[in-house]
Amino acid sequence: MCQSKFPNPDLPEEKSGSSHSDARRTFLKQSSLLTALALAPSAALKAAELKYEEKVAAVFEQVKVTLGINGKKQKLSVEPRTTLLDLLREQLHLTGTKKGCDYGQCGACTVHVDGQRVLSCLTLAAMADGKEVTTIEGLADGEKLHPMQEAFIKHDGFQCGYCTPGQIMSAVACIREGHADSEDEIREYMSGNICRCGAYPNIVNAIKEVKNGGQRV
Amino acid sequence: MIPFQYVKPSKPKAAIDTVAKDQTAMFIAGGTNLVDLMKRGVMTPEKLVDINKLPLRKIERENGNVRIGALALNGAVAEDKLVMEKHPLLSQALNAGASAQLRNMATVGGNIMQRVRCPYFYDTAMPCNKREPGTGCGALQGFNRMHAIFGHSEKCIAVNPSDMNVALVALDAVVLVSGPKGDRKIPFAEFHRLPGDTPQIHTNLQQGELIMAVEIPENPYTKHVHYLKVRDRTSYAFALVSVAAALDMDGSTIKSARLAMGGVAHKPWRLNEAEQFLAGKTANEATFRQAAEIAMRGAKAFEHNKFKLQMGPNTIVQALKNAAGAV
């Protein structure tokens, strides 16, 4: 636990003795030297020697992850700061998943991780290591749209379309979870997906149709 | 977000030692609050210790207690059979919080540690004694509609935003903690703090201490319970006022009661005196109204949240009526 940017007065002095940057520098030196020996001796050692800390950090503070993306296994290298959303959009060019608020308030970035709907903007890519991710691109069966995609088109479940990928990923999960038994229940369990255009009644109708149609989602 | 180092230990001891030794390190579990705060520059850990490999996900029964692992997901706990049967109040409170997506990410331990949602805490351009001690409280004379009416200080008037915490304090839960100096148990009511002069200290956890589980003792509140949350929209919003009510009934007589409020204080607000008043009384509106009056004693509102002085007691009465049901 770190109490924001200041020391915790409940703790003894010596623990807050070294400054953040000191600790960081020490870590960088140690880790860069150790890792450098194993990986890229000359370049990294030289960088460490010249105190090019940021450069060393950029080379070595990468986390290797293996993710299943829409059924395909991918080995990737990510900076710890990278969110799953940014990984999908910027590195993998899967731009179907949308960045709305980027703070976990709108639901536009909803994807499935290991079958559960989650917000990719608040998921660090490094933390999704070993998991199976499904995005809107992975929902259709080739050229054949997923029943929920068909239903959204049929019921006009969108206007501008920006929230739609998140709405559809959430809607599919809503039925799989067993939370689409009534309009009220659908509204409650779809409340994490905000639609600025106000297509809510049509979204509810689309979900109802898929649910009542009994198709496999 | 500032750069940080990321580590993922597989043993609790390694995780605890790492954070205990390094003031700049923090645990991360679901990340739904911390990643948000890091993006905004409110929290700036230089090392994240991902605890998701630790074996802390189980929900189990032990000597009558229900023990919920710190990494159990909010959504999973809300729909767990044992929780629904033994502690339906907790299930209701969890389902009233956040959205389905967030409940699939957020853990029980993380929910307990959730920071305040005060806009002055979130905005690094604003004064906030919690974020930066000594800069003042922006909310005190500012926009304080969502803020506290109990237990606040001149230094901070923010509220604890969790719904789960309100149910857990009502149910006399105990937080099981492991740290560099060993294990300890913290009663839920003593886990969070009032702001006083040190609003920057969020909870009574020490550096490096890790929540391992929450234990709820066996209780008779399996039937007459209700979590009532009043908010600006029907779903997916923080509480203006919420009430967790649990009654043990014998016909129309209340044998005992548990009552707590959310959205009104810096910690989940247990209403002990109102509970004592309710014990032995007949369940009816007049009784509930009197209990609500007792509960509201000492409340002090600010410019924009005076409505909570009426909304508070009304929500208590309604929650108790819903909990009692047709008696």
Image (cartoon, grey):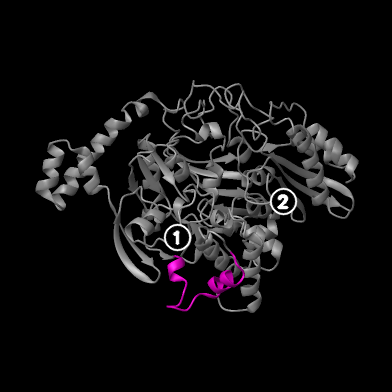
Q: Which image quarter is the N terminus of chain B in?
A: top left
Label 2 and label 1: CA atoms lie apart by 45 Å
Q: Secondary structure at mark 2?
A: loop
Q: In the displayed structure, does residue B19 sit left or right of residue A214? A: left
Instruction: Write the residue at 68% across / 46% down.
Output: B171
Residue B174 appears left or right of B247? left
Q: Nearer the viewer, mark 2 or mark 1?
A: 1
Q: Residue at x 52, y 65 (%)?
A: A169
The kind of residue on which mark 1 rests is: Thr
Query: Can you give x and y, in whole percent of width and height, for residue B41 in the image?
Result: 42, 36
Q: Is residue A156 magenta?
A: yes
Which is nearer the eye, B169 or A69?
A69
Q: Quadrant of residue B297?
A: top right
Q: Is residue B172 left or right of residue B289?
A: left
Q: Which residue is mark 1?
A: A97
- Helix, strand or loop under label 1: loop
Identify the residue position indicated by label 2 in the image. Answer: B219
Viewer can see residue B60: no
Type of the residue with mark 2: Asn
